[in-house]
Amino acid sequence: MLADAVARALTQSAHAVDIARSGEDADRALSAIVYDLVVLDLGLPGLDGFDVLKRVRARRSTVPVIILTVRDSVSDRITGLDLGADDYLTKPFHLSELEARVRALIRRANAGASSELLHGRLRLDMAGRRLYCDAQPVDLSARELAVVELLLLKEGRVVTKQQIVDHLYGWEEGSSSNAIEVFVYRLRRKLEHTGVVIRTVRGMGYMIERSHDA
């Protein structure tokens, strides 16, 4: 029930979410897929959360990990942090606090500590989930906003279509490269007046850049 509630909350904030319901499933998923962040319950069936975390770090993965647990002793917190967790949240907790910690860790992993991403005349408020050009809001759907967020987080780097698919959709949702092309087409039209363009890097993916006329 908690996993489903967390997944719903994060999905409503435009994150793509996969749920692994056992330690073994979590380990297999983390071995095969590169995630932006892991929310890890310690009380998993099979492998417990500490074992999953050990295996993640043994593979030299640097994916940010937030531990969720009822274990609130200092020794458990120390164990989790020493094993490589980036944050530690005890139950019960407010979903809004978890969402804030998720945003903070993703920011740190990609673009530093600021809650805003700036590019030319664009400003993305990651906490408020709004994009602005100068002081004016740009009207975007949740998934269009998620694409802009990914491009800004990876500023200066090519973002592949598969990375966009992984950013937008969970395991149970299907998508295609054609759907990504539609999102990018819509975004280009909505960003025409902003002095920012989404450039296609042939055979690779997309980059966000300032237009030559800006």
Image: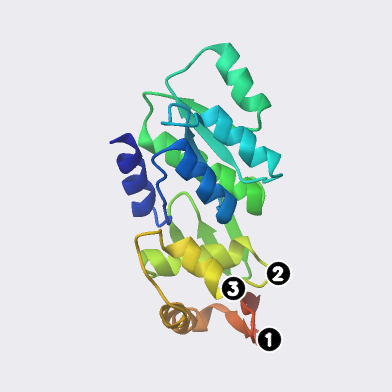
For the residue marked with disc 3, what is the amino acid? Thr
For the residue marked with disc 2, what is the amino acid? Gly
Closer to the camera, 29 or 131? 29
- Residue where numbered disc 3 is placed: 160
Distance from Cα at disc 2 to Cα at disc 1: 16 Å
CB under 8 Å between callouts 1 and 3?
Answer: no
Mark 1 or mark 3: whose residue is earlier in sequence: 3
- Residue where numbered disc 2 is placed: 156
**Are there few (<14), some (14-19), or many (20+) residues within 10 Å of tag 1?**
few
How far across and how far down the image is residue 134, in percent?
Answer: 53, 68
How far across and how far down the image is residue 174, in percent?
Answer: 37, 69
Q: Examine the rendered structure and indicate whether residue 7 appears above or below residue 200.
A: above
Q: Examine the rendered structure and indicate whether residue 105 appears above or below residue 120.
A: above
Q: How many marks do you count on the picture?
A: 3
Q: Residue at x 53, y 35 (%)?
A: 66
Q: Which mark is residue 82?
A: none
The local secondary structure at tag 2 comes to loop
Quarter of the image for residue 197 reads bottom right
Q: Residue at x 56, y 55 (%)?
A: 32
The local secondary structure at tag 1 comes to loop
Mark 2 or mark 1: whose residue is earlier in sequence: 2
**Residue 131 in view of the camera:** no
Q: Is residue 213 left or right of residue 37?
A: right
For the residue marked with disc 1, what is the amino acid? His
Q: Residue at x 38, y 27 (%)?
A: 93
- Residue where numbered disc 1 is placed: 212
Numbered disc in front, either 1 or 3? 3
